[in-house]
Amino acid sequence: MKWLKLGKIFDPSQHSLPNDCVQFAQSPQVLLFDSFARIYFSTRSVDVTNGKYLSHIAYVDMKKDFSETIRVSEKTVIPLGELGCFDEHGIFPMNVLRHGNTVFGYTCGWNRRSSVSVDTAIGLAISHDDGNTFERIGNGPVLAASLHEPCLVGDGFVKVINGVFHMWYIFGTGWKKYASDVAPDRTYKIGHATSMDGIEWVKEESRQIISDRLGADESQALPTVVEIAGRYHMFFCYRESFDFRKGKGRGYRIGHAWSEDLLGWTRDDDSPLLEGTPGEWDSDMQCYPHVFKCDEKVYMLYNGNEFGRHGFGLAVLEV
């Protein structure tokens, strides 16, 4: 297998974004309709009280061959959380799936801390208008930190398989100062949980299901799972836990693992391999993959340099 890159398909600077948002179209995630594809993404506004970013969820509708933009949402699809709640300062990303006559949206909520920059948890919101707007089922999360997963639970990707909800997500193993003059950096790994209703979840507590390639300080993010020819394939992004923003070769790239039974995963980043194109929008970083099937093809949406500041691109799998 290998990826055929189709280039950048959405640049937020070329469109009017809702809620005074500027730049950034991070973590694109698709919801398919009969005649078009809706791609949700996280964009950013600026908090006027402190100048820091707030992350919001918007969407773009595109033709199902992803050759043309139809519309960009005029409003964000869900407001940020209440004062002091887990999603007060941002939602990034949101994973969507159809469930009966509704659309479930699993949100990764962000809230600022004092000793470290943020913490996260996973919430659930439901849409009754075909994904135009979402309403929380409550102000708290459905999956959060626990005894052996002390922080930074997020990036939930949910798929229903044989009547069981499966969620692949990340959990933080902790924060660490790698130098005396820098802020603490976080490390997180990929975990797995199951549910019978999509609300009450049981974790495989503290079991890191994907092996490290860069050592214990490897951070793994945004798992996405697709079935191809009877085998499950997981794509995710991984990086060094420190000096990853500007350190050459230390930023995000796309990882891959496969499984026959959803229990044991074999890591194989080299097949299929997706690399950046020198001098292009994804030259230094490839991150936040979302893999899905559309019209008998397997596609990957992903972000490039600067964590999706400049939009997202698309690749198609050649089997």
Image (spheres, rainbow, N blue to C red):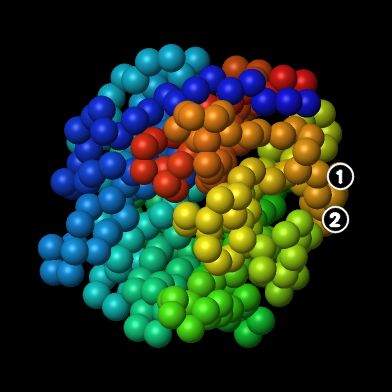
Q: What x and y, as percent, mark residue 48?
A: 13, 63
- Give, as a three-letter code, the residue at label 2: Gly
Q: What x and y, as percent, mark residue 264?
A: 85, 55
Q: Residue shown at 28%/24% (left/top)?
A: 71
Q: Quadrant of the C terminus?
A: top right
In the foreground, 233 or 203:
233
Q: Is residue 216 left or right of residue 125?
A: right
Q: Which residue is mark 1?
A: 260
Cβ atoms at labels 1 and 2 below 8 Å apart: yes
Q: What x and y, as percent, mark residue 190?
A: 66, 61
Q: Is residue 287 above or below residue 315?
A: below
Q: Residue shown at 22%/38% (left/top)?
A: 17
In the foreground, 10 or 306:
306
The crowd level at tag 2 (other Cα within 10 Å; few <14, some 14-19, many 20+) is few
Disc number for residue 264: 2
- Give, as a three-letter code, the residue at label 1: Glu
The crowd level at tag 1 (other Cα within 10 Å; few <14, some 14-19, many 20+) is few
Q: Which image quadrant for residue 291? A: top right
For the residues labelled 1 and 2, the Cα–Cα distance comes to 8 Å
Q: Which image quadrant for residue 240? A: bottom right
Q: Secondary structure at mark 1?
A: loop
Q: Is residue 169 above or below residue 256?
A: below
In the foreground, 139 or 25:
25
